[in-house]
């Protein structure tokens, strides 16, 4: 994972942060030879702090070659022995998550470097705290305040006549992987919920994610029902789904989207799971969305890595890309989300989404659908709330709507980078109950603190706020592209897109407009002052504004 | 919905297959028919245009939300176009305001735009040629601009079907005499109003003065001169009357081989290096004649190659680059991907879209053209070499590459007037055989090849790199120019390194949009020009999205700023209080389609389009698909 020195996403410059905060301290400072996967061996100086590894070239203008938070390291191996022959055959092989692997060679002893790296890259295995708990960075904004579930539900107009907020999971005793606060049908009592929980995998009962402000249809998420081979039924679950259906007073059926491919849903019966059958749920209609599980997705992503690292496949780029199936997966997720959004937006029926356990595919579908339906989630804070609330794996799926989002590409990449960096507590642990136990909000800094203190850096100048506009991307391969600026950004051959000329021009025009408006106001003030004071003041030609150059 | 296809019912007509279903109920036809008679749509004829034949009660099918709807109207054929006159809602007047530059109507197909005509007989689609024994129930017209029209003839009188179908086939397929081309009758009838601003007009390059002006503009007049030796086409009818050659070249030399073997100037770089082109000498068997050719070329060569002051690099496009046949084959495959008959076909091809695209090789051809143009640019700009393009007639790939190089290197060629002048200089005066390449006279099928040559030029605004450089063993040059000259051709490795360094160093610096521009040529950077190729496909339109969304925001902002500027100026002049008025914003970016301004808003509803076909077989990932979900750390990937 060689970061190109020119990368515009090297947001954290070492000089500013590394030493001055008491928590970053240098552990190693040595000369090594770095085997760059793109440019071959480079002599450099490596520094390892308790947060990151970085490397400066000793050859070209001491350029920064590597800057890797230790949290992204997934494997460290020794290569060769002290007696190994051949150039650069003795050293360390460091593999990083998601991105590329790093080969780093050392001229002499590597033992201390290996030990220190291993300790700090995998702190939990060495009874050390994760770096996020040591980080003492201070920001103007406290990102932990961004998401307040009660406020977010209030924004959606909840609770109302049909939906209530329940504290049944306050101590995570109903479902340990659910948040403390849940929105459920008004007509379902807490006892009902407990009985429904017995019939849903990991007790993940259907709860509200989003409600349409006008037609009051809802998106509800949950895990699969525990039908099993014998085709078990649960009256409480059946009744509960019917109660959900009735909340928007539509006569139509409740639509259930099972994210899985049909065959997998059937196969899940063998392990006690399954899906809602027609016989048991008369008032529901079930559709399978054919989205594959995380294992298939991971395999596909691995193939993407193979075609872009270290060299970008060129002569057969398109067929190689096709063979990874990655964009096909994206297309299916997108198609599923469009269906969810369309169902709710047309007011035809409420929607229940689940897969097996209801965290990967379900969260993807509900959050994408909400992004399409609710323009609030397309603002910086709204998106942060969505991430905090629903968890999201975000591709480049909405690039086709360049004016609909308040944030830019850098915002998304920053979020993805800190998914693994361990600098912030935002993505630590798997569920709210553990986060609370570990006092994450008290002991760590939120990623949103970093972003919200520098909002301008993450803003899209073209953003046009449009309330209640539903966005429907076109889920066709003709429009899907690999997110080059994320997946291939470390390759110096694929140059970072230079600042988009259209965007540059637009920002210039925005500044000019503000200047003119101010100028006009001043003139207005001056002329109203003049009206009261009739003495003539000739306007000098030098006051004229320069004309806009429309050479663009 | 299938049943609705059975319209009329009588006469033994069978219910059509789903792919050609008309979703029109009988009652709809009646109301529609009434409307047609009420709202008679008039045919707009250009001056000199004549109506040849017509048929009424023709159904035009419109794709909408993955089903088809029909509109009744009249189908006519003139000596210029095929036109459908119907009460089509999609051609609403308020849309027209967005298309001030529209020349041909949405339902007009000029005769020369017709690519292929198909008839549907008993639900089977067959290409139509010549005399027909049987007339189709449906006419499908594929256009060269990639539009696809479906006209149902089931309710049209038999006589009219015969007349219109054979009329259309005849006027789009039969060989034509040059003098019968519509443009001549149009020119005779139309008022000639070519009032142009002399300061701001396209340079036609049909006078000595135009060439002198271009030489002066590029400071090429130090080493090159405009000649009038071909005035009246005395030397060659292939060459323009006036052109530019190296100053030391004697004019008699031009006459020796009818202008062949002469380095003809295209453009001069700021450092004085020039881009030149040369057509090949006739192939001779006789040793004596070959010897004469050789010594002639040796002499010619000295005018552009005088080391150490001036060095020339030769690029033989006939033997070391794409063949015209390659280009033609690739384009025919490529365009087929966009001529889509219905929604089912769109989604069926969507799953294997990338491999279909790749197997056409079209994007690869674009990449190779761009790469060659960058190599030439590198020689001119970085190596201070003249570049001489060699080609059989110097009128196909020469036109393409010299235009590409100039667009990259000369900002003037990126202005509207500059680009038009470039086309005039390199393609029109450059002697590109439009009549043959476009087969305007429809002489025979073999002439059709090599047609699409100008397309890589227009597509090259996108960006590509590496791997396609062929071995530079130049037989033609060796034979023609002798061993001494072939030494000048660099080895391919050296070239590759120079190219890489030049390309990478340019891309690592900030761009000056008014200077040299190099396109990206990496695999992921070469993309389909969606606005051109997908423009007629309703499924591919993104409502309120695409690049047009940012462009229209920019235009709105520009209008607003200009408006504010005017107000400030007025204040300075009048000093009085002006009524505050809101800037007039004509555009509403949210409602525009991603394909604006190339296509009308064809989708009326805001319903999303959904793929109708699903997933390909997974193959080796099948066992993974069966595994249980678990909470996994994506970072293990």
Image (tube, helix red, strand yellow):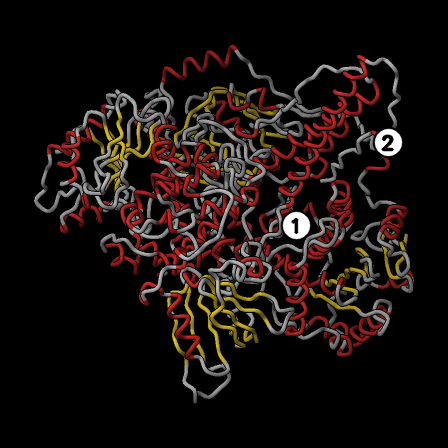
SS category of the residue bearing label 1:
helix
On screen, residue B17 versus residue B584, left or right, reads: left
Residue A277 coordinates in the image, percent (x, y) = 16, 37
Front-most of residues B381 and A43? A43
Among the 4 quarters of the image, the one containing residue B506: bottom right
Residue occupied by mark 1 = B457
Q: How many marks?
A: 2
Residue B355 coordinates in the image, percent (x, y) = 44, 54
Front-most of residues B336 and A246? A246
Q: Is residue A3 visible?
A: yes
Residue A208 coordinates in the image, percent (x, y) = 28, 33
Report in which chain the residue with disc 1 lies.
B
Image vertical order of residue A9 relative to residue A210, above or below: below
Q: In front: mark 1 or mark 2?
A: 2
Image vertical order of residue B324 relative to residue A266, above or below: below
Front-most of residues A254 and A168? A168
Residue B597 coordinates in the image, percent (x, y) = 60, 33
Image vertical order of residue B585 relative to residue B441, above or below: above
The N terminus of chain B - image quarter: top left
On screen, residue A93 versus residue B449, left or right, reads: left
Q: Residues within 10 Å of mark 2 (few under 14, many from 20)?
A: few
Front-most of residues B276 and A417? A417
SS category of the residue bearing label 2:
helix
Question: Which residue is rendered at x = 38% and y = 70% of the image?
Answer: A118
Residue occupied by mark 2 = A542
Q: Residues within 10 Å of mark 1 (few under 14, many from 20)?
A: some
Question: Which residue is rendered at x = 41% and y = 79% of the image?
Answer: A111
The C terminus of chain B - image quarter: bottom left
For the residues beneath circles 1 and 2, the answer to whether they share a chain is: no
Report in which chain the residue with disc 2 lies.
A
């Amino acid at each position: 994972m060689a970061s190109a020195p020119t990368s515009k996403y090297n947001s954290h410059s070492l000089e500013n942060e590394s030493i001055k905060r008491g928590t970053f301290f240098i552990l190693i400072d040595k000369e090594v030879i770095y085997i760059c996967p793109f440019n071959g061996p480079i002599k450099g100086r490596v520094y390892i702090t308790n947060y990151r590894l970085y490397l400066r070239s000793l050859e070209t203008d001491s350029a920064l070659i590597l800057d890797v938070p230790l949290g992204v390291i997934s494997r460290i191996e020794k290569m060769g022995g002290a007696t190994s022959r051949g150039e650069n055959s003795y050293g360390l092989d460091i593999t990083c998550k998601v991105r590329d692997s790093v080969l780093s060679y050392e001229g002499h002893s590597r033992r201390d470097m290996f030990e220190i790296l291993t300790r700090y890259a995998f702190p939990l295995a060495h009874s050390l705290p994760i770096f996020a708990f040591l980080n003492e960075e201070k920001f103007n904004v406290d990102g932990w305040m961004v998401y307040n579930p009660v406020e977010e539900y209030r924004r959606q107009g909840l609770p109302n006549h049909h939906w209530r907020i329940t504290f049944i999971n306050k101590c995570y005793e109903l479902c340990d992987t659910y948040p403390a606060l849940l929105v459920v049908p008004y007509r379902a009592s807490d006892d009902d919920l407990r009985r429904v929980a017995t019939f849903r995998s990991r007790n993940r009962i259907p709860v509200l994610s989003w409600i349409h402000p006008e037609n009051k249809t809802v998106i509800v998420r949950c895990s699969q029902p525990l039908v099993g081979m014998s085709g078990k039924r649960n009256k409480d679950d059946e009744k509960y789904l019917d109660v959900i259906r009735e909340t928007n007073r539509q006569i139509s059926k409740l639509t259930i989207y099972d994210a899985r491919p049909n065959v997998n849903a059937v196969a899940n019966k063998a392990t006690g799971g399954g899906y809602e059958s027609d016989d048991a749920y008369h008032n529901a209609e079930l559709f399978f969305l054919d989205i594959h599980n995380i294992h298939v997705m991971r395999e596909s992503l691995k193939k993407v890595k193979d075609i872009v690292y270290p060299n970008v496949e060129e002569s057969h780029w398109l067929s190689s890309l096709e063979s990874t199936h990655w964009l096909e997966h994206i297309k299916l997720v997108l198609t599923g989300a469009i269906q969810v959004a369309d169902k709710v937006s047309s007011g035809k029926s409420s929607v229940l989404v689940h897969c097996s356990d209801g965290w990967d595919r379900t969260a993807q579908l509900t959050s994408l659908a909400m992004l399409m339906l609710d323009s609030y989630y397309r603002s910086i804070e709204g998106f942060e709330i969505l991430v905090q609330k629903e968890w999201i794996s975000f591709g480049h799926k909405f690039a086709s709507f360049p004016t609909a989002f308040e944030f830019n590409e850098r915002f998304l990449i920053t979020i993805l980078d800190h998914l693994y960096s361990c600098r912030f507590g935002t993505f630590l642990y798997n569920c709210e109950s553990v986060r609370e136990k570990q006092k994450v909000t008290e002991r760590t800094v939120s990623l949103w603190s970093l972003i919200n203190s520098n909002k301008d850096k993450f803003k899209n100048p073209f953003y046009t706020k449009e309330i209640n506009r539903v966005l429907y991307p076109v889920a066709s391969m003709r429009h899907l592209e690999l997110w080059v600026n994320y997946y291939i950004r470390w390759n110096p051959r694929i140059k970072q897109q230079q600042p988009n000329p259209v965007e540059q021009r637009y920002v210039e025009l925005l500044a000019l407009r503000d200047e003119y408006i101010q100028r006009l106001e001043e003139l207005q003030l001056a002329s109203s002052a003049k009206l009261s004071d009739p003495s003539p003041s000739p306007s000098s030609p030098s006051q004229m504004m320069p004309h806009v150059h429309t050479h663009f | 919905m299938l049943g609705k296809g059975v319209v009329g019912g009588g006469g033994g007509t069978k219910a059509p297959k789903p792919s050609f279903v008309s979703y029109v109920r009988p009652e709809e036809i009646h109301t529609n028919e009434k409307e047609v008679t009420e709202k008679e749509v008039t045919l707009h004829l250009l001056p000199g245009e004549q109506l040849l034949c017509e048929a009424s009660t023709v159904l035009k099918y419109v794709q909408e939300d993955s089903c088809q709807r029909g509109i009744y109207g009249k189908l006519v054929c003139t000596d210029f176009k095929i036109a459908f006159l119907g009460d089509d809602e999609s051609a609403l007047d308020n849309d027209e305001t967005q298309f001030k530059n529209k020349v041909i109507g949405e339902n007009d197909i000029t005769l020369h735009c017709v690519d292929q005509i198909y008839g549907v007989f008993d639900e089977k689609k067959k290409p139509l040629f010549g005399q027909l024994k049987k007339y189709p129930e449906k006419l499908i017209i594929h256009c060269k601009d990639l539009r696809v029209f479906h006209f149902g003839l089931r309710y049209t009188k038999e006589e009219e079907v015969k007349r219109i179908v054979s009329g259309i086939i005849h006027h789009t397929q039969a060989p034509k005499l040059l003098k019968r081309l519509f443009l001549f009758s149009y020119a005779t009838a139309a008022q000639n109003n070519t009032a142009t601003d002399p300061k701001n007009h396209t340079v036609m390059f049909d006078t000595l003065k135009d060439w002198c002006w271009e030489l002066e503009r590029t400071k090429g007049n130090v080493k090159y001169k405009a000649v009038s030796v071909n005035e009246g086409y005395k030397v060659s009818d292939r060459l323009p009357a006036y052109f530019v050659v190296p100053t030391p070249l004697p004019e008699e030399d031009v006459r020796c081989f009818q202008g062949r073997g002469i380095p003809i100037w295209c453009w001069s770089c700021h450092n004085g290096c020039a881009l030149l082109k040369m057509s090949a000498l006739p192939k001779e068997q006789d040793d004596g004649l070959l010897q004469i050719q050789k010594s002639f070329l040796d002499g010619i060569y000295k005018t552009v190659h005088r080391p150490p002051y001036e060095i020339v690099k030769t690029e033989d496009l006939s033997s070391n680059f794409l063949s015209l046949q390659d280009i033609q084959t690739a384009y025919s495959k490529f365009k087929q991907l966009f001529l889509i008959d219905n929604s089912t076909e769109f989604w069926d091809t969507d799953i294997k879209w990338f491999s279909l695209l790749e197997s056409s090789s079209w994007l690869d051809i674009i990449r190779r053209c761009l790469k060659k143009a960058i190599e030439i640019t590198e020689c001119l700009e970085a190596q201070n070499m003249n570049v001489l393009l060699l080609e059989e007639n110097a009128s196909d790939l020469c036109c393409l590459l010299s235009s590409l190089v100039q667009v990259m290197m000369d900002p003037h060629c990126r202005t509207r007037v500059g680009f038009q002048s470039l086309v005039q200089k390199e393609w029109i005066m450059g002697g590109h055989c439009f009549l043959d390449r476009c087969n305007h006279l429809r002489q025979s099928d073999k002439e059709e090849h090599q047609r699409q040559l100008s397309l890589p030029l227009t597509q090259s605004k996108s960006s590509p790199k590496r791997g396609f450089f062929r071995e530079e063993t130049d037989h033609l040059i060796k034979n023609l120019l002798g061993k001494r000259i072939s030494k000048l051709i660099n080895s391919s490795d050296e070239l590759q390194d120079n190219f890489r360094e030049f390309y990478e160093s340019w891309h690592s610096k900030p761009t000056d949009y008014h200077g040299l521009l190099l396109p990206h040529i990496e695999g992921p950077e070469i993309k389909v020009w969606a606005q051109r190729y997908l423009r007629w496909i309703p499924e591919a339109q993104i409502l309120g999205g695409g690049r047009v969304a940012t462009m229209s925001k920019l235009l709105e902002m520009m209008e607003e700023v200009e408006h504010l500027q005017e107000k400030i100026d007025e204040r300075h002049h009048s000093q009085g209080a002006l009524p505050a008025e809101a800037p007039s914003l004509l555009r509403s970016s949210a409602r525009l389609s991603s394909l604006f301004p190339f296509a009308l808003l064809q989708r009326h509803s805001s319903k999303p389009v959904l793929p109708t076909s699903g997933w390909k077989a997974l193959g080796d990932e099948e066992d993974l698909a069966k595994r249980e979900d678990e909470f996994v750390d994506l970072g293990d990937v």
